[in-house]
């Protein structure tokens, strides 16, 4: 017997029965990344909403909570950088939650992010604290990272997973030479 699925639209007071196999076969399986950009990172309204989520201490969905960020920064500072002042490239830096903490430990930090609200926030936090952070508003796929400028290039959260594999490889190549 073939499986069935029932779809109910309460607002329309309409019930539709479909054969699940017909549903599966009615369109081609989507090809990853074929439809292009889906997340409007640089849209001002979306960027404002994302900033609120980045700063929230209720969850780790956009950025991690302060306590976890502090542990990450402490570990990277001591274990990876040996406690020495270094030049750090923070790709997808968001509101600068890592960048400002590294700068407070004596590192020179350049952050790149595509969200205008997060970039504004990161710049303001760095300026108000007198921290050596350069925050650039740009798509990390298109930004110029320079050559031999950084001791560490990092992409801390999960943004890397949304890029097409060709873009991901290009980001890694640029980060490696930066």
Image: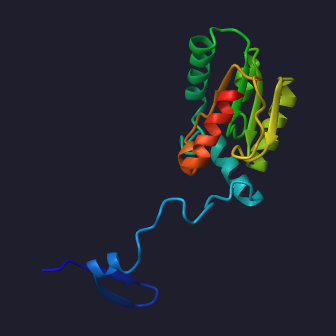
Question: Picture quarter containing residue 99?
Answer: top right
Q: Quadrant of residue 35?
A: bottom right
Question: Vertical placement of 116 versus 57: above or below?
Answer: below
Position of the C terminus, as image quadrant, is top right
Q: In the rendering, at what x and y percent does residue 67 appear?
A: 57, 27
Residue located farthest toward the left when viewing the structure as drawn: 1
Judge by depth and name the residue closer to the eye, 86 or 27: 27
Task: Name above or below for residue 103 compared with residue 47.
Answer: above
Classify residue 35 as left or right of residue 152.
Answer: left
Residue at x 63%, y 42% (from the top left corner): 170
Instruction: Give x and y (percent) for residue 148.
Output: 75, 23
> Where residue 3 sits in the image (x, y, percent)?
20, 77
Total labels: the figure holds 0
The quadrant in which residue 43 appears is bottom right
Q: Is residue 34 left or right of residue 173?
A: left
Q: Which of the image's four quarters has the N terminus? A: bottom left
Give the colour scheme shown. rainbow
In the rendered image, residue 151, in percent from the top left (x then y), is placed at 69, 19
Residue name at image x 41 percent, y 84 percent: 9
Horizontally, residue 20 falls left or right of residue 31, namely left
Compared with residue 77, is residue 53 higher up or lower down, i.e. above or below?
A: below
Name the residue rendered at 82%, 43% in the picture.
120
Image side of residue 166 versus residue 52, left or right: left
129 vs 47: above or below:
above
């Amino acid at each position: 017997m073939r499986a069935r699925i029932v779809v109910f639209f309460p607002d329309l007071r309409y019930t539709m029965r479909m054969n699940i196999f017909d549903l599966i076969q009615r369109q081609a399986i989507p090809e990853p990344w074929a439809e292009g950009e889906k997340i409007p990172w640089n849209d001002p309204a979306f960027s404002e909403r994302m900033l609120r989520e980045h700063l929230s201490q209720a969850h780790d969905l956009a950025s991690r909570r302060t306590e976890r960020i502090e542990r990450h920064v402490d570990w990277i500072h001591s274990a990876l950088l040996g406690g020495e002042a270094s030049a750090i490239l923070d790709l997808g830096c968001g509101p600068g939650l890592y960048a400002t903490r590294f700068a407070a430990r004596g590192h020179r930090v350049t952050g790149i992010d595509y969200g205008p609200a997060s970039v504004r926030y990161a710049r303001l936090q760095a300026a108000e604290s007198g921290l050596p952070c350069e925050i650039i508003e740009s798509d990390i796929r298109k930004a110029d990272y320079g050559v031999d400028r950084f001791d560490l290039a990092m992409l801390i959260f999960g943004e890397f997973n949304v890029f097409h594999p060709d873009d991901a490889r290009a980001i890694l190549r640029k980060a490696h030479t930066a």
